[in-house]
Image (cartoon, rainbow, N blue to C red):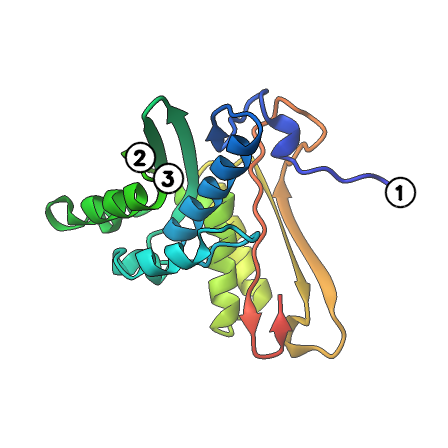
Amino acid sequence: MGRKVHPIGMRLGINTLWQGRWFAEGRQYREQLHQDMAIRALLQGGGSKGGAATSTQVRKLQREMPEAILKEKAGISRIDVERFPGKTKVSIYTAKPGILIGRKGEGVKRIRQALETLIGKKVDLDIKEISTPDTDAVLVAHNIADQLERRIAYRRAMKRAIQTAMKQGAQGIKIEVAGRLGGAEMARNVVLREGRVPLQTLRANIDFARTEAGTTYGQI
């Protein structure tokens, strides 16, 4: 039986950068890793997972965040954290930068203040726009999950995502959904693909994402 590996993890250092770029030793490594987890939980509208000590603080700070983040409508795909002496740089990749920035930059100010309160250091906030959101794996996965939760037929949602991604210039795409599809009694997997997805070629630029949709008949 073949052994499956994470397609992004296999390409780190080849054509993909780490989302956390910093160096630490001993106990400091654990603390900074928990900070990274808390930063992502704060910006992606969810609770801090993995037992991070800052989970209570994250929930308090989320009340001060822009409404788009709390309702997960900001289209955030990726959050990079870089650490320098006395300063931390947080880069947010989003399909809707205007929603995050807000009127007269009010959204950016609130996000920066919340981050500085969370980690206790000066934060350099950089918001980067994703020019082709229909080819971003995270955003495509969230879009399909949102449609499934709104009871749109899973096959229609998958085909629509594939067609849109190929029109935006993707060379290939593969989508898999698993669970009680359409409310069926027995769970199953359905895979649709188009074009080339060369997982064995390490120099190939492969994007990957996994998410869950909470429906009335279970998780998909």
Identify the residue at the far right of this view. 1
Pick the residue in front: 45 or 196: 45
User: Where does residue 32 sit, x and y in percent of width and height?
Assistant: 48, 36
User: Where does residue 68 sit, x and y in percent of width and height?
Assistant: 29, 58
- Residue drawn 59% across the image and 51% down it: 210
The numbered dot on residue 1 is: 1
Q: Are marks 1 and 2 in contact (CB under 8 Å)?
A: no
Which element type, helix, strand or loop, lies under badge 1? loop
**Left or right of 6 in this view: 109:** left
**Mark 1 surroundings within 10 Å by alpha-carbon count, few (fewer than 14), some (14 through 19), many (20 or more):** few
User: Where does residue 39 sit, x and y in percent of width and height?
Assistant: 41, 45
Which element type, helix, strand or loop, lies under badge 2? loop
Q: Quadrant of the C terminus?
A: bottom right
**Mark 2 surroundings within 10 Å by alpha-carbon count, few (fewer than 14), some (14 through 19), many (20 or more):** few
**Left or right of 95 in this view: 182:** right
Label 1 to label 2: alpha-carbon separation: 48 Å
**Left or right of 164 in this view: 15:** right
The numbered dot on residue 93 is: 3
Kind of residue indicated by mark 2: Lys
Label 1 to label 3: alpha-carbon separation: 37 Å
